[in-house]
Image (spheres, rainbow, N blue to C red):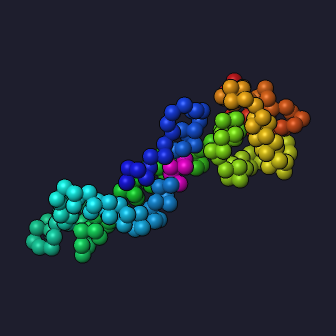
Amino acid sequence: MRRRFQGGYRGSGPPFLKELNQTWTKYRITALRYDIEDEYNSWYEEVIHFASKVGVNITSPRGPGPRSSLQIYRANAPSTCPKEYYLRNLAMPFADYLLAEFNSRFNTEDRKGIEILALLPGAITLGVVDLESVLIGLMFWGPDLPFSSLLRSEMKEWQRYWSSKEPNQLSVNLSECLSHADEDIFPNILTLLKLDAPF
């Protein structure tokens, strides 16, 4: 399962990608939990393959009998075979635990400002963000924007503006972006940058 979650931020690049990646990881874990049975089948096949290489038989740790009734402190969901046992007692609870932790740490209501990070040149030119989902998130500030109906076209123009620059000319923080956001061309983006840029 370790391979599944290795989509993390690595190497050089804008540091805001780490924040965006944590949010996307939450969505990937949610999708994983809904597809856990399909994913688990491929994991189990890999485990069987590796176990056969080292000469190990996969068995359930507790079978039916008097000792299994003593299990009171941990989950022991009934199962008919080792594959089902590990799915019900390990894979599903682990995915539920990960999802609960990510939901508590990365609550969408607590992270309304993360979409503004998508205005950074590194995000908008590298194509790491989906403009449509960013626009939906940015409409949270719709009442504060001077021309909220023009935000979509402004975002596309903002993307073209930064795409025409050399990589070494890209601003790395929101404060630097403020000087590039002309009030006549990018009134909504200027307002959004002012909302989130530290002064």
Q: In the displayed image of the protein, which residue is found farthest to the right?
A: 184
Residue 112 visible from this viewpoint: no
Q: Can you give x and y, in whole percent of width and height, for residue 119 in the image?
A: 71, 39
x 28%, y 68%: residue:
83
Relative side of 178 to 2, left or right:
right
Question: Is residue 24 covered in magenta?
Answer: yes
Relative vertical location of residue 127 with respect to residue 47 in this rendering, above or below: above
Give the vertical position of 125 relative to 72 (above or below): above
Q: Using the rendered image of the protein, determine whether residue 26 is visible from the camera's viewpoint.
A: yes
Residue 48, above or below 80: above
Q: Is residue 20 left or right of residue 97?
A: right
Q: Position of residue 189 (x, y in %)?
A: 78, 38
- Residue 154 x/y as whole percent: 82, 43
Q: Locate the N terminus and report the quarter of the image it occupies.
A: bottom left
Please tell me which residue is depicted at 38% across the width and 50% down the height of the picture. 2
Tell me the quarter of the picture where residue 91 sits. bottom left
Give the residue drawn at x 54%, y 38%. 18
Instruction: Name the residue nearer the viewer: 52 or 160.
Output: 52
Q: Quadrant of the C terminus?
A: top right
Q: Which residues are magenta?
A: 23-27
Q: Is residue 32 magenta?
A: no
Number of callouts: 0
Which residue is at the far top? 199
| Residue occupying the far left of the picture | 66
